[in-house]
Image (spheres, rainbow, N blue to C red):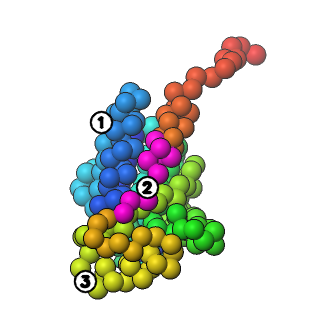
Amino acid sequence: MCEIPVFYATTEGQTQRIAERIAQTLRTRGFDSQTIDVGTPAASNIDWRHVRAAFVGASVHAGKHQPSAYAFVRAHAGELNACPSVFFSVSLSAVSKNPQERAAARQLAEQFAAAAQWQPQSIACVGGRLAYTRYGFFKRLVMRMIAKHEGGSTDTSRDHEYTDWAAVEQLVHTVANALRRTPDTIAVGA
Ligand SMILES: Cc1cc2nc3c(=O)[nH]c(=O)nc-3n(C[C@H](O)[C@H](O)[C@H](O)COP(=O)(O)O)c2cc1C
């Protein structure tokens, strides 16, 4: 049984890391939470009757989120719309020094949700990771050029993380507080 599943799609691992931090923080707040890769049978076998809220994360590559994340959200838009849900979109443009790039990251995330007919209560654009040590030669070259353009690090001897972990945890606490909140007044009778 999972009260708050944290679904994710990842290509180089950073969205999974963020999903794990979200689930871990939710567990410290007393919720039953697990990370679930959208491409695994566990994602299709989730028992939605026990779900109180859900997070879905995907990352941006060449201007698109993972098709597996889109397929999952499209298939489960009804269930996601029936509970409080959060979309976290991981990219480098989310933390670009250029405000237009940051606006474009938000627009991409909003379009992803709208196209899948999902209305998340919150959309968070989260900075990802330049995983230079994990890229092959050409990918490293391309990513270095993009980083140079965006004001990211061009030191390819190591990876560079742009995830604001405090902001990720704050997002989780906001959701946890909303779920824990009890009504101020209870109307009894007419
Ligand atoms: C080949 C490639 C293409 C990328 N394209 C984009 C892009 O179009 N826009 C962007 O903001 N970030 C882009 N990124 C950065 C990724 O979104 C970032 O590295 C993120 O942390 C990846 O998350 P993941 O490790 O969960 O896959 C790209 C990264 C790679 C390796």
Q: Residues within 10 Å of mark 3 (few under 14, many from 20)?
A: few
Which residue is at 38% across, 59% downward?
Answer: 161
Residue at 47% across, 44% down: 166
Residue 75 percent coordinates (x, y): 41, 61
Between 120 and 74, the one lying in front of the other is 120
Residue 144, compared with residue 40, is above or below; it is below
Q: Earlier in the sequence, mark 1 or mark 2?
A: 1
Q: What is the C-alpha distance between the residues marked 3 and 2?
A: 24 Å
| Amino acid on which disc 1 is placed | Met
**Residue pointed to by mark 3:** 137
Can you tell me whether the CB of the residue at mark 2 lies under 8 Å from the nearest atom of ligand 1?
yes
**Element type at marker 1?**
loop
| Disc sitting over residue 16 in the figure | none
Left/right of residue 54 with respect to residue 111 in the rendered view: left
Instruction: Tell me where the magenta segment starts and ends, as one range.
Output: 160-169
Q: Quadrant of the C terminus?
A: top right
- Nearer-N-terminus badge (1/3): 1
Residue that carries the numbered disc 1 in the rendered image: 1
Taking the image as shown, residue 172 lies to the left or right of residue 141, namely right
Residue 5 visible within the image: no
Q: In whole angstroms, how far apart are the C-alphas of marks 1 and 3?
A: 43 Å
Q: Is residue 17 left or right of residue 126?
A: left
Within 10 angstroms of label 1, few (less than 14), some, or many (20 or more) residues? few
The kind of residue tagged 3 is Phe
Q: Is residue 174 above or below residue 29?
A: below
Q: Nearer the viewer, residue 80 or 181?
A: 181
Quadrant housing the N terminus: top left
**Which residue lies under the disc numbered 2?**
163
